[in-house]
Image (spheres, coloured by chain):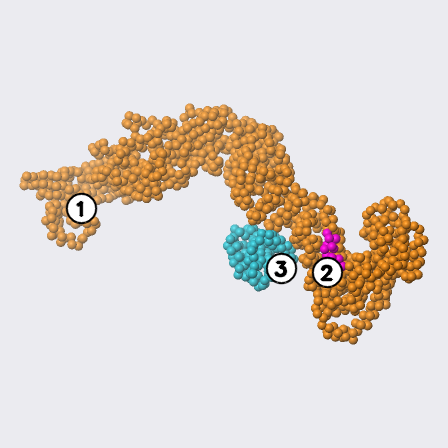
Chain colours: A cyan, B orange
Amino acid sequence: MASTACFVIVSKNDIPIYEAEVGSAPKKEDMSYHHQFILHAALDVVQDLAWTTNAMFLKSVDRFNDLVVSVYVTAGHTRFMLLHDSRSEDGIKSFFQEVHELYIKIFLNPLYLPGSRITSSHFDTKVRALARKYL
Amino acid sequence: MDPLRSYLGRLLLEEITPVVMVLTTPLAEAACRKSGLSFVDMLSPFSLFKKIDVPVRTASEVPYRLQMFKIRMVYASDVQKEDYEVSDERIKPVVSEANEKALPDLLSDPPQLEDVLGKPKAELCPLWIKKFNRELMRTLSFSEHETFDHPVACLLVVSSMDKEPISKFVDLFNTNQLPSLLNEGIMDPQILKHYLVLHDQQEGPQDIAVSVLAEMRSTLGLNDCKLLCINSSTEADGSNPDNTWLPYTALGLENREGTCFLSTDDLNEIKDFMQDFASNHIIPYMEQKIRVLNQQVATTRKGFRNQIKNLWWRKRDDVPEAPNGPMYTFTSIESQIRVLGDFAFMLRDYELALSNYRLLATDYKLDKAWKRFAGVQEMSGLCYFMLDQSRKDAEYCMENAFSTYLRIGSSGQRNATRCGLWWAEMLKTREQYREASSVYFRVSNEEPSLHSAVLLEQAASCYLLSSPPMLRKYGFHLILAGNSYYMSDQRQHAVRAYRNALFVYKQNPWSYINDHVHFNVGRWYGVLGILDVAIKHLLEVIACSHQSLITQNMFLSDFFHYVQSMGKKFDVYKLQLPVFNMSSLRVIHEDHRTYASDADVDVSEGTWQELEEELIPSSSVVRTNWLDTQPKSSLRKYKDSCVCVAGEAVKVNVELKNPLQIPVDVSGISLICQLSTNLDALSFDVSGLTLDAGEDKVNAEPSVSILETDEDNFIVSKLDIILGGGESKIVQLDVTPKVEGILKLVGVRWTLSNSVVGYQYFEFGAQKKNKKGKRGRRRSFNNSLVVIKGLPKLTGSIDRMPTKAFAGDLQLLKLNLRNLSQFAVKGIKMKISNPRFVIPGDSPDIDLEFPDCLKKHTQSEINLVPYKSTKENFKGSLFAFPQDIEIQAGGTHSWPIWFHAATPGNVSLYISLYYEMESSSDIKYRTLRMHYNLEVLPSLDISFAISKSSSRLQEYIVRMDVMNKTPSESFVLHQLSCVGSKWAVSALSSCNSISSVETVSANQAVSCFFKIKDFEADSCKESESGSYRSDMALYPGSNGDVFDIARSPLADFHFQERYRQGKLAKVTCSLLDFVLISKEAGNSSKPSPDLQLLSHHTCHCSALSQSPIWWLMEGPRAITHDFSKSCCEVSIQLVIHNSAAHKSSVRVVTSDVMPEKSQTVHPHDSTSVQGGWHDVSLENDIKAISSAKGTRHEKQSSKSISPYVWCSLSSAQIELQPDSCSRVPLKVCIFAPGTYNFSNYELQWKVLPSKEAQVDENGSSGGGPGHPFYVTVLQSV
């Protein structure tokens, strides 16, 4: 079954620092901006929701028609946002947790400037592998 | 907040009101038409009563007063359900009307965040949207399942002109003309009837009407008949009505045609009529009906018994499920309850209404009449709202209704929309904006694109109103709305929506969003014909590197389409295509330092300065203030700025990058410059410009068109290139100032695809300066250059300078100098960074044939004069050209240059030429800097091993190992030379022909042996002959043409090599320098036009053993003696040579006892045959057996007694001066004929160090046994 999944890491300045279409649905040109719009709009909701809970995983915070936005907020207020069809929450949670570990590794890199774009190809392949595993 | 005062409250009060069905005769209608109005139009302004103040008593006994009341007047023909298509057509103008109003707004700047947040709430939801909402709700009028649109009363109107008015009234209420809903039994046809005679005053006096009225009263009833007179005003102008109509225009009454015959009296009469009609007829009728119905409901449904009965009855009655449930006629109890509820709602007895709705809801639910159920839920939700009770219940009811409507499919869609609108309004009243917007969004999904667009816009505004404002959601929904608008052909609205969202996405790093918004806004502006704004927006997206090729193409083609439809070129500041990498910006200008090629500029200034230290006058070495020497004080201001020369191009290198995958055509790339000849005026300007760098400068800059042409003062080069997809190129832009002044580099301009002119100003920020600090040359760089008077300039190049060479390659090159200016230059000097590789030749060499000029000339021609002169001129690496050389204006000059690839590796050669001006000018001298990189490949690897000859003094055996390290080339060895006249080299006598080694093929190694001899040793003079020369030809046929290594340039190169290889230490006589000259074998496929000559220099070779004492036995080798007479006495000499630098003492000890080891010595030949095998254990036995083998061993076989006896002295001690020979005479006495080896002696030597010098321990003393010296003694006959 073709599924949509768009994963974005948004820095605390609301700048996307990593973007990946990890769904199995064939990538369409016009959908990429569509996904961005939805994720961007969901930031408003995240902003409210992030301060109401101690949990990092905020579950699904927003939906647009049949697309759901699940969000994970790190301690540094970097947000992992996943736009997906309705799917198991557990898988998404584990996905986020593992990506968080990867992200911390990136963060530990002394040459990585926090808030800049993540260009590591290693990170990219790892994230895609995780997406295949959990999503 | 009082629900009645809220927007929704007022909406409900105005919309859910009693309906009066109007039936008119054509004549009555005609009378109204005179004023341009229909009858309903004429009455409707007066159907709203703001303060009717009527007491109302419904089911409860307590009366209350009704304040605001409204009656809806509807023609009977309109009492029917409208088609969706028709109603949608009616809504469309509402939207498009607003469209036209929006147009001027679009030309202004898009709103900013502060503007939007500061706006009052009312503006966010403009009037037309409210109107639209209302129209959308009205499309549901007269639906089957709701009764508040059912007519409460019927107004029958007959004109006084009608014949037989009474019968007309009957005709009017004829059943077959009535709306179908009434006939189908859905509406109750038994409604209140009211009769009206309309009299047109212009048609005649009022008497007829009065008589008709009287007649009506008698037949139709006294109270239900009325007379209304209109058109009493005689003057048909528009001036009067303005005042009288004024209070009513706001209510929607518009006099469109301008003529109006209605006087104030008429209007008052209409008003009174309506007041009477409402308060005396409609409201009492409704009260009556409520009471009756309530009674009925109470008896049939209220009470425990009725409820049981009802449940029982319904359960048994299993009706088949239909989408609308079972048919309910007006007589059914459910319909009556609904009517009761609606009437109560209209009379604002919400409690009564609610209780009835709730009662009904359970019934409909049981009946599975979902649409009706939803309708009832909707109404009870509104009741809750109006009562301002439990919000939760209200929301629950609305949600329930909404979802139920949606569930029943398409027939409930519009109802769902209406329900949603009410619901959203309800939430808005309670300031639950987020919920409201989500309701709007849900509603919008169910509607066609136009409606959904308006609804989405409302959703967006709700997000903005929520606190804190959710701007991203606002933007997103506006974008969605804009899209829907566009799909329904409302372009202005689409642009407006996108424009309003722009500030949300301003400077947004979400690239796809940005591109989408700007591209669509741009495109739609283009469609609307507002091209300049369109292009402005499209400019934002044309450099979209992350998009796919198709998208990029689309963006670009749209952009060019609009640009072309603009019909003119226009300038764009900071055009993004192509991208100019400003950090790559480099300005190359030449002051007193000139460069042979652009690549030479990359070499760091420090390298050049180091090179030129001795070259240029010392006063100018301090570079910062060389301008201080100028007498002109005005120039001193520009001490920090750079200097360039009029007539010489200033080059600017900048990198262009095409971010797209599509090739773009960039033409006319040129610099924007300003050249001011007025120094004083500009001095102020320069300082001003450097201060306000960056964005502020844009405004201050004069427009580009002014800067474009200044042809008198400078020339700007124009460059056209095509950049492929993703390509980046470094381009060089020139500006050539023509006059003195100050040249200011302002920016760069280019034309994209012949249609758009982009320009960009250079920014000279602080961080640039840091970068420049690294490169000395541009440290003081800013955008202004001082242009000084034209100067002579030399350009130079070395002809055929190789970039790749084999190690040892020797070539004659030519340095060409050209003077392009109008002045002569003189005093040329040259400095070369690496004289090991390049040395200047002598001037006569220019005509010589290479390599013949290197060949040895006949004795007469040799003179050392040129060699010496070169030495003088070429001290260190500085070379002064002869003083008489002067390069005239336009002239050229050539000078030979010798090139020798000394060592393998990558080598940078720096050559700097210094020259002075013939004419006096600001700058006294200039330098020309040349820089070459070359790669030297390894070719032949040569090593020498030298060992002393054991047979002769001052002779050495040399083994030369030649290894060819090239993968494919082979070389012919040509000549081996020893440097200096002291040494002679010759082939070994045993191998005269070495022709077998003449060629060294690729990857092969060759060894050959030579003998060298010291000429100058005093003791060895006797052996000088013609065969000993310092050069030896290795190539058989080349005996004649041996190259002379003692002449320039070989000698010079050798000097350099020697310096490098041995640090030029003290030259001791034992150190040897060899030069091997080889040629590249021309056997390979490529024909080599000129013979390649390689010379390898190996310096400071020395003998392997370092023993300073060298001895040799001399004497006769064969003696004939008559042993019968006496024993034979042989005189021999021991020649001892001290080659050490110090005095040494040598002691010679002879011994008559054979040392142990001498007995075991095998004959030399047999040892060599055995190849190193020594059988020690059996030696003595074999000796015994073979004792008679040869005569020479005869004497040795006896163990302890030597066959000969030293007879002169047993020990001698001599002292030897450094580098001298001494002879020790020795005598041996022999008793029998045979061959004797006089080696039975020992030499012990000791170096006696002079007082000051220390000699290392190893070489200070030593000793050794004697060398074998065979003498054969024969018996004389």
Q: Amino acid at mark 1?
A: His
Which of the numbered marks, if any, corresponds to residue A66? 3
Which of the numbered marks, if any, corresponds to residue B795? none
> How far, Cα to Cα, is label 3 from label 1?
105 Å
Q: Is residue B1275 magenta?
A: no
The region drawn magenta spans B81-92
Which of the numbered marks, if any, corresponds to residue B1164? 1
> 10 Å neighbourhood of mark 2: few (<14), some, or many (≥20)?
many
* Left or right: where B1254 falls relative to B837: left
In the rendering, at what x and y percent does residue B1126 appear? 6, 40
> How far, Cα to Cα, is label 3 from label 2?
23 Å
Residue B173: quadrant of the picture: bottom right
Q: Nearer the viewer, mark 1 or mark 2?
A: 2
Depth check, front residue: B717 or B943: B717
Which residue does the numbered mark 2 point to in the structure image?
B415
The answer to whether mark 1 and mark 2 are in CB contact below 8 A is no
In the image, residue A97 sits, relative to residue B1041, either above or below, namely below
Q: Amino acid at mark 3?
A: Asp
Q: Nearer the viewer, mark 3 or mark 2?
A: 2
| Residue at disc 2, secondary structure | helix
